[in-house]
Structures are given as C-alpha cells and as structure tokens.
Image: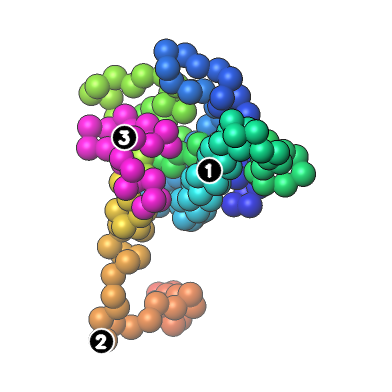
Amino acid sequence: LIHRIPNIKCDDDNNDTDGGEKKGMEVHMIYGQNDWMSYTGGIDVQRACHERRRVVAAEQREKMEKDSTGGNACVGDDRGGSGGNTQPPRVFVHGVKDASHLLMLDNYEEFNAALIIASGGEVGVDAPRPVEFACDEVAGLGSSSSTVRSHRRDGVVGEEGAAEFFRGPRWNREKRPDEKEESWEGDDGLEEKKVEEQRA
C-alpha cells in the first residue's frame, strides 16, 4: 500500500469546488492503540502522498509558466512527470484509544467517530473522538495543509506523539540492566510441577 496509494489518480481535485474548499479522494487509516498492525504504515503513506502532491503542484506551476510564455511543455502529461493533473489522495491517520485490532469492539464510540469524520460528517463537541496523527512534514504545516483536518481542539499529533500513543511506555522504554528477557517458553515448567504436586 505504501507504494500504491500515492499513485492513485484522483484528478477531481482541480474540478470540484464547494465553497472554496477543494474536493478530492481521501484515504483514512484507523488503528487501535494496541493494534498488532503498525501505525507507521499509515504515516509512511501520508508522507509519500504529501511529497507527491508537492511534486505534482510544482510540475503544474512549471507547465502553466511555460504555457503562458509560449514554450512547449510536456511536463505533467501521460508520457512522464506526475501523470497529468492528478494529485494523490490526502491521507489521514486516526488512533482509537484503548483498542486492539478489533477496535470496533474495543472502543466502538471512537471508532464510530472516526468513520463519521472519514465520511465528512461532524462529531459532537462532547463526543469521544479518535486522535489524528500526521507525519512530521504535514504536522509542521498545521491547519494550512489540506492533509490536516483535525476535529480535535488541540490539533494533530506528530510522529513522536504517535510513537508514545500507539506503543506507550511498555514498548518505548529502555530495558533495565537487571531486567530478565521475557521468554515465549512460559514459566520454565513451574505450572507442570504444581500440577504434579497436587496429584501426589
């Protein structure tokens, strides 16, 4: 997906406007806070689409400049460049608190709010809502980016905050020198010894 989503052609970005707001394809990725799937995939797709949008916009400006000066420009056509006036989709990454991979069961309120946000709806002021995350390039742009549509009062959370949210202190902490390595082998047979003692 990291390599496919940025290449999706959605050229309706330049054609449809509604009250000055540009329309276009959006991709919303929703992860549970304790999900086994890594949220970094969503962040990486967002970064790739953001970079591609910048490249396409630069090519479009260059083409318009060449056209206005009478030069022959083939930038942005289907033979090279960005593939026409096609912008990749805007990507949004949402995190649902206290949820694993089955986030719709673990925290249905925030999951439902994420779906409402993804469909362009409004979530009530006091309603639980997911956290919106953005790659550092997009988070640094704040509300001026069309890739940020935070419904949170405190805005989007960058990559450092995402690492803390999704894996929390148990995943991001340094191991103490005296701490034993956890083993998948279990309790070294202690449970079997207890069962044998009870039988005797």
Q: Earlier in the sequence, mark 3 or mark 2?
A: 3
Question: Residue 108 is drawn in which quadrant?
Answer: top left
Q: Residue furthest bottom?
A: 178
What segment carries the magenta color?
A: 134-156
> Which residue is the site of mark 2?
178
Please tell me how crowded label 3 is: few (under 14), some (14-19), or many (20+) other residues with Cα within 10 Å: some
Secondary element at image label 1: helix
Marks 3 and 2, how far apart at CA? 46 Å
191 up-or-down from 180: above or below? above
Is residue 48 highlighted in magenta?
no
> Which residue is the site of mark 1?
58
Q: Name the main secondary structure of what is drawn in magenta.
A: loop
Q: Position of residue 120 (x, y in %)?
A: 45, 21
Secondary element at image label 3: helix
Q: Position of residue 64 (x, y in %)?
A: 58, 33
Q: Earlier in the sequence, mark 2 or mark 1?
A: 1
Could you tell me which residue is drawn at 25 percent across and 86 percent down?
178
Q: Quadrant of the C terminus?
A: bottom left
Secondary element at image label 2: loop
Residue type at the position of mark 3: Ser
Query: On the picture, is 66 further left or further right than 128?
Result: right
> Which residue is the site of mark 3?
143
Can residue 131 be seen in the rendering of this structure?
A: no
Q: Residue furthest right?
A: 79
Q: Position of residue 52 (x, y in %)?
A: 55, 46
Residue type at the position of mark 1: Ala
Dot in front, 3 or 1: 1
Residue type at the position of mark 2: Asp
Could you tell me which residue is drawn at 59 percent across and 52 percent down?
2
Q: Residue furthest front?
A: 70
Could you tell me which residue is drawn at 53 percent across and 32 percent down?
26
